Image (tube, rainbow, N blue to C red):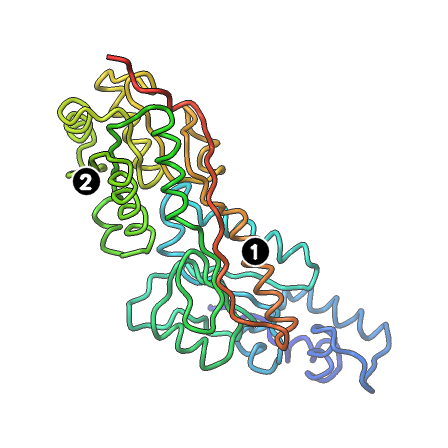
């Protein structure tokens, strides 16, 4: 026999009060001319606990002006890669929201949606955080309903708010580090083809800036002709043995880890023969050995700032103006970069 979840009517019947009284007590909405005796309040709470009553979130949200719910959109594409920056971003978003003590709950959408589908939840929300991108119907719904939102590491529509890292500045910083060490044969490895199809701005910003800076320094750009995750040993043979690269700047830490593994297999010492660096964040770098030299994208700062901006939009809507905050990236030198070999 299929059991049914206890309802508001079940709690009211056992407590001997009306459903509206139960609702007010459970939602802590006493006052404004409505009050109950303390013994009644305690009886309702105790019966709800014994019945393991859980309110219908969707139905509840339809009757509330503020749901105290913040929804993170884009979990499926942003959180699927192990150790990527968005895990740090989300951790810091929740830390900031929890520390404010305003009673907000955070949900994360991990479902896969088609390009013509909305990613909005079935319940009402007070605000949204978008990780890199969302579908067009999602943004249309957010704008139509006037929901406060912040985009992290991606573009916002005109009049919206976003927090993004400066990949152009970060790429220049990486090449400055390598050229100051004395490297002249510096290669660049883009992300795997499946990520190239996504078309995130960082893909073009990093590669185009690499090409421009190499030419500005009078150096020849060396861009990987292979997918680094397909056959990394073949890639290194081409870049190091054929094209004489002494340093490689990788798009991300997974590409860099594959390069280090292939270098070990081919007996290419790092950093004595080959320097390797990438774009990453502190969280991912902590679990790597050897410690990669990397350009820190500031994911912790992105998450913290995005949460603060969203809470300000929710609590002080009359003071808010569109913002696009661009954060500088920073160089973190570890053990995988050194001057090139002398011979």
Q: Which of 63 and 150 is in front in this view?
A: 150
Q: Which of 32 and 43 is in front in this view?
A: 32
Q: Examine the rendered structure and indicate whether residue 259 appears above or below residue 92.
A: above
Q: In which quarter of the image is residue 31?
A: bottom right
Left or right of residue 159: residue 273: left
Left or right of residue 57: residue 138: left
Give how far apart the Cα atoms at labels 2 and 1 are. Answer: 35 Å
Left or right of residue 152: residue 55: right
Residue pictured at 42% horizontal, 56% vertical:
153
Q: Examine the rendered structure and indicate whether residue 5 appears above or below residue 249.
A: below
Residue pictured at 42% horizontal, 38% vertical:
295
- Mark 2 or 1, closer to the camera: 1
**Residue to which mark 1 is pinned:** 305
Residue pictured at 43% horizontal, 71% vertical:
120
Q: Examine the rendered structure and indicate whether residue 39 appears above or below residue 62.
A: above
Which quadrant would the C terminus be assigned to in this image?
top left
């Amino acid at each position: 026999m299929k059991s049914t979840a206890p309802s508001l009517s079940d709690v009211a019947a056992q407590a001997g009060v009306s459903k509206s009284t139960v609702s007010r007590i459970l939602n802590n909405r006493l006052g404004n001319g409505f009050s109950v005796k303390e013994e009644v309040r305690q009886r309702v709470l105790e019966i709800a606990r014994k019945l393991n009553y859980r309110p219908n979130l969707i139905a509840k949200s339809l009757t509330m002006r503020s749901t105290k719910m913040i929804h993170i959109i884009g979990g499926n594409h942003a959180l699927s890669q192990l150790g990527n920056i968005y895990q740090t971003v989300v951790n810091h978003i929740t830390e900031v929201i929890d520390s404010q003590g305003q009673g907000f709950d955070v949900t994360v959408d991990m479902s896969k949606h088609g390009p013509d589908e909305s990613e909005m939840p079935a319940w009402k929300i007070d605000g949204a955080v978008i990780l890199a991108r969302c579908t067009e119907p999602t943004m249309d719904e957010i704008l139509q309903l006037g929901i406060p939102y912040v985009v992290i590491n991606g573009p916002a529509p005109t009049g919206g708010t976003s927090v993004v890292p400066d990949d152009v500045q970060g790429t220049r910083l990486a090449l400055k580090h390598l050229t100051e060490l004395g490297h002249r044969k510096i290669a660049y490895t883009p992300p795997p083809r499946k990520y190239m199809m996504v078309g995130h701005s960082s893909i073009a910003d990093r590669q185009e800036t690499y090409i421009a800076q190499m030419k500005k320094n009078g150096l020849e750009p060396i861009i990987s002709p292979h997918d680094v995750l397909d056959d990394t040993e073949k890639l290194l043979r081409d870049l190091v043995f054929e094209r004489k690269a002494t340093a490689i700047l990788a798009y991300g830490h997974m590409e860099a880890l594959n390069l280090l593994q292939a270098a070990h297999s081919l007996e290419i010492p790092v950093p004595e023969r080959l320097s390797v660096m990438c774009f990453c964040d502190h969280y991912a770098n902590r679990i790597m050995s050897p410690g990669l030299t990397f350009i820190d994208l500031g994911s912790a700062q992105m998450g913290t700032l995005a949460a603060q901006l969203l809470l300000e939009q929710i609590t002080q809507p009359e003071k808010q103006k569109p913002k696009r905050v661009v954060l500088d990236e920073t160089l973190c030198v570890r053990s995988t970069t050194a001057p090139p070999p002398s011979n």
